[in-house]
Image (cartoon, rainbow, N blue to C red):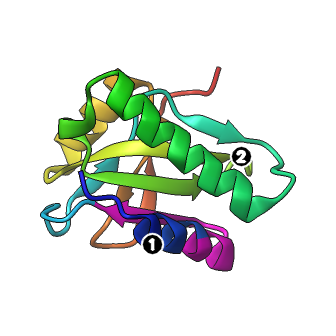
Amino acid sequence: MDFTHQNLTTTARTFMDHLEGATALLPGAPEGGYVVGGLVPSIVLAEPDQWLPDVQDAVARILSDLIVTETVAAAQAVGVWRDSDTGLVYVDASSIIADREDALAVARERGELAVWDRVNGREIRTGVREG
């Protein structure tokens, strides 16, 4: 697994710059497709005290969870995104799925609120409700 410290720091900083979302892709991740979180439970940050350190810490915890649960091989990305409805910040370990309907089905199975359309650069809600 090659999520370098620089790659993850860049992802956290990109998120900070845009406050929407950012994704660190694993080398060899497919082009396009839909980013689907939920490989391990998301880390949710309501109001981080120090944005950059809190986001970096959450990313490190997600990577640790991937190792502990032996799901590292399935991970293609680690992403940080802000829920457009609630403003909560989610840190997720993700897979990338080429087909929109397949991605939405997997996301619903995992209880994900949304997927990220990499081609069109937009969030697609799954219909799953928080809670």
Instruction: Decide whether residue 15 is among the magenta residues.
Output: yes
- Report which residue position mark 2 lands on: 88
- Give the residue type at disc 2: Leu
Instruction: Name the residue: 15% across, 69% down.
Output: 31
The x and y percentages for residue 117 are 33, 61
Q: What is the crowding at mark 2: few (fewer than 14 residues within 10 Å), some, or many (at least 20)?
A: some
Identify which residue, 38 or 127, lies in the foreground.
38
Label 2 SS: loop
Q: Position of residue 53 (x, y in %)?
A: 72, 58
Which residues, given as a range, are shown in magenta?
A: 13-25
Identify residue for label 1.
Answer: 6
Q: How far apart are labels 1 and 2 at the CA level?
A: 25 Å
Q: Relative to residue 116, is residue 68 depicted above or below?
A: above
30 relative to 117 in the view: left or right: left
Quick one: 41 or 98, which is closer to the camera? 41
In the displayed orientation, state which residue is furthest to the right.
Answer: 49
Amino acid carrying label 1: it is Gln
Q: Which residue is pictured at 26% across the width and 25% down the height?
A: 70
Where in the figure is residue 115, as x and y percent of width and height? 39, 48
Mark 1 or 2, closer to the camera: 1
Q: Quadrant of the C terminus?
A: top right
Question: Crowdedness of circle 1 by 10 Å Cα count: few (<14), some, many (20+)?
Answer: few
Judged from this view, the residue extending furthest toward the bottom is 17
Q: Nearer the viewer, residue 3 or 31?
A: 3
Q: Earlier in the sequence, mark 1 or mark 2?
A: 1
- Secondary structure, mark 1, is helix
Which residue does the image show at 56% across and 76% down from the upper left? 14
Asked whether residue 53 is in view, the answer is: yes
Residue 22: percent from the left, percent from the top? Answer: 49, 66
